[in-house]
Image (cartoon, rainbow, N blue to C red):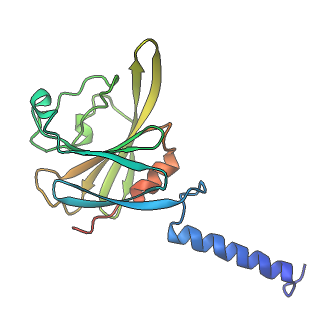
Amino acid sequence: MTCGSSTWRLGLVALGLVLAMAACGGTDGSGRKDTTTTIKLTGLQLELTLPDSMRLTSISDGSAEAPRIGCQIEAASFDYGSSFAVEAVPSACDIHNGGTGNGYHGHYRTVADVPTNPRLTALRLSIGDAQVFEQPYFECTNSCHHYTDRIAIVTLRHPTDSEHPTIVLRTDTRSLGESQFEHVLYGLSSPSG
């Protein structure tokens, strides 16, 4: 093949298109298309770049759960064949995390709230620094199923509310693989600060 051949030129054009799509964030590398979703928690407007098929299913102000846990935790939940959530836990909240399972994934403000000593991965994001880890999770009714939660605690660089200096993103490993979860984290932005 010579540099002047049409095959060579077509190959360069195809490579250019692939690099342009990757640079523009068109997919997460899996071939799925992304969509940007905006949520508002505790005055923080947050933009998430998510796989196109992930849908927002609910936003909770935490008032229903507040009497049981002693504080109000705002959350946005998404469905993607399984669960994905974003939470804002107030810094004044008295956290008592035990084991996880059967609907309880834990509530975290910082890594100090995690009951185990997880292996942490540090990521520097546009909105702040994230500590990413995994934890075991189970659901039992007539039989038990064991999963792994993937969690990121993000310390916001410019929180809009001093009572909420962090946000937490959580998914299970069935929903998003490690690189897909990191793709979501690196796509986080906050037009409000």
Left or right: 54 in relation to 28 = left
Nearer to the camera, 118 or 175: 175
Query: Residue 77: x, y in percent?
Result: 32, 44
Query: Residue 157: x, y in percent?
Result: 23, 61
Query: Residue 106: x, y in percent?
Result: 27, 32
Q: Split into 4 quadrants, where in the image is the N terminus?
A: bottom right
Left or right: 178 in relation to 41 = right
| Number of callouts | 0
Name the residue at 32% across, 25% down.
100
Q: Is residue 184 above or below residue 147?
A: below
Name the residue at 34% across, 23% down.
101
Q: Is residue 21 above or below residue 129?
A: below
Q: Is residue 71 above or below residue 123?
A: above
Q: Residue furthest top?
A: 142
Query: Residue 99: x, y in percent?
Result: 30, 22
Q: Split into 4 quadrants, where in the image is the C terminus?
A: bottom left
The image quarter in which residue 113 lies: top left
The image quarter in which residue 156 lies: bottom left
Residue 32 in sight in this render:
yes
Q: Residue furthest right?
A: 1
Q: In this view, does 38 lie above or below 100?
A: below
Left or right: 30 in relation to 138 = right
Nearer to the camera, 127 or 131: 127
Name the residue at 53% across, 71% down.
23
